[in-house]
């Protein structure tokens, strides 16, 4: 950085950093980006990548398989498929009354019940269906939320779909 480069390449920049060092790294990246610098970050720590990068590229076997903002890649879930090797949405349901194995839907992949709580894996956002289904059966909902796929989920989906066969 002594030469004040316009483009900076960083490989695993947070490896071996303590929490304070990671904080300082994030602040430096923000500052450099605000100065108009282009920063390429190569890292396997995908949670960190999603915190500092505006544009993300997923490379599998040397080929760029997905590129865009995290939101653009998330919104393109259908391109990466669904099912065991694709992206499924996680829906968390907590009710006031105990739930039994009652929910059925074509996009449903898996349900894990635990008394008043269920973790539902589905190929699409079926929260409205779940809400109506439970309401019609007199089961009151305490919480119903969708957990968005993480960058790690997206990476694994792209990777698994591109390396099949």
Image: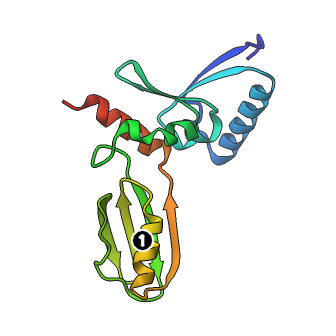
Q: Is residue 97 above or below residue 40?
A: below
Residue 142: x and y, percent? Answer: 53, 80
Residue 49: x and y, percent? Answer: 57, 37
Element under disc 1: helix
Residue at horizontal 79%, vertical 31%? 31
Residue 1: x and y, percent? Answer: 73, 17
Residue at horizontal 62%, vertical 45%? 18
Residue at horizontal 50%, vertical 61%? 146
Residue 16 seen in the current view: no
Question: Is residue 142 shown left or right of residue 1?
Answer: left
Q: Is residue 120 above or below residue 40?
A: below
Q: Circle 1 sits on which residue?
A: 130
In the orientation shown, which residue stands out farthest toward the right?
35
Q: Is residue 137 above or below residue 61?
A: below
Q: Is residue 37 above or below residue 79?
A: above
Residue 95 seen in the current view: yes
């Amino acid at each position: 950085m002594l030469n004040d480069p316009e483009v900076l390449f960083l490989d695993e920049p947070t490896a071996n950093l303590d929490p304070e060092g990671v904080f300082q790294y994030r602040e430096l990246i923000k500052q450099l980006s605000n100065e108009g610098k282009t920063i390429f970050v190569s890292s396997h720590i995908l949670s960190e990548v999603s915190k500092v990068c505006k544009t993300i590229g997923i490379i599998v076997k040397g080929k760029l398989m997905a590129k865009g903002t995290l939101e653009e890649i998330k919104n393109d879930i259908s391109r990466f498929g669904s099912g065991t090797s694709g992206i499924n949405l996680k829906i968390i349901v907590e009710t006031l009354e105990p739930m039994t194995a009652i929910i059925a839907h074509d996009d449903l992949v898996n349900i894990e019940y635990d008394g008043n709580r269920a973790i539902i894996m589905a190929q699409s956002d079926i929260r409205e269906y779940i809400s109506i289904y439970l309401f019609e059966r007199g089961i009151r909902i305490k919480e119903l939320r969708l957990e968005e796929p993480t960058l790690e989920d997206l990476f694994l989906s792209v990777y698994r779909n591109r390396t099949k066969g």
